[in-house]
């Protein structure tokens, strides 16, 4: 049996997120050192910041996640996979439209091992 090709699905999800989303930046915090409120230092920008990502921020449905400890400032971020194929699982913050969100939880939507979309619970 031939494996399913997810290329079309990945392209479709990226087009939809780009159509309805906003460009943003993913930020990875430093290695346990104090890096200030922004979560990164300018000299580490090449290693700790992923630019050019596209994000859709939506309301969080409390019924969909009944066991999570939710706050009123929680939202869901749908993130298109970066064009270079970089994984976003190690990032800690998102800056979208001038607002910085803390990534509380992130999951890859990856049928067959191909990342189609990232779904993150974020907090302001």
Image: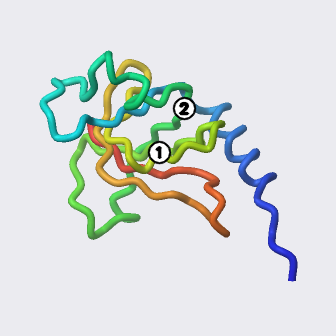
Name the front one of labels 2 and 1: 1
Check whether the beta carbons of the residues at disc 2 and disc 1 lie within 8 A of each other.
Answer: yes
Instruction: Return the residue nearer the eye: 30 or 23.
Output: 30
Question: Which residue lies under the disc numbered 1?
Answer: 88
The location of residue 15, given as percent across then percent down, is: 72, 38
The location of residue 115, given as percent across then percent down, is: 61, 55
Question: Which residue lies under the disc numbered 2?
Answer: 53
Residue depicted at 21% across the width and 49% down the height: 71
* Outermost residue toward the bottom in this view: 1
Q: Quadrant of the C terminus?
A: top left
Image: 2 above or below 117? below
Residue depicted at 34% across the width and 36% down the height: 28
**For the residue carrying disc 2, how many other residues have a C-alpha within 10 Å: few (<14), some (14-19), or many (20+)?**
many
The location of residue 9, given as percent across then percent down, is: 75, 54
Residue depicted at 27% across the width and 36% down the height: 29
Q: How is the image coloured?
A: rainbow
* Residue 114 falls in image quadrant: bottom right
Give SS at disc 1. loop
> Could you tell which of marks 2 and 1 lies nearer the N-terminus?
2
Relative side of 4 to 59, left or right: right
**For the residue carrying disc 1, how many other residues have a C-alpha within 10 Å: few (<14), some (14-19), or many (20+)?**
many
Give the distance between the C-alpha atoms of the residues marked 2 and 1, in whole angstroms.
10 Å
Instruction: Return the residue nearer the eye: 99 or 92.
Output: 92
Image: 110 above or below 80? below
* Outermost residue toward the left in this view: 34
């Amino acid at each position: 049996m031939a494996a399913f090709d997810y290329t079309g699905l990945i392209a479709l999800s990226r087009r939809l997120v780009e159509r309805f989303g906003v460009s943003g930046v993913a930020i990875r915090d430093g290695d346990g050192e104090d890096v200030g409120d922004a979560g990164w230092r300018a000299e580490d920008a090449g290693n700790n910041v992923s630019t050019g990502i596209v994000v859709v921020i939506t309301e969080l449905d409390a019924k969909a996640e009944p066991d999570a400890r939710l706050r009123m400032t929680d939202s869901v971020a749908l993130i298109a996979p970066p064009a270079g194929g970089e994984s976003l699982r190690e990032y800690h913050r998102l800056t979208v439209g001038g607002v910085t969100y803390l990534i509380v939880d992130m999951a890859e939507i990856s049928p067959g091992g191909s990342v189609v979309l990232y779904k993150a619970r974020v907090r302001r």
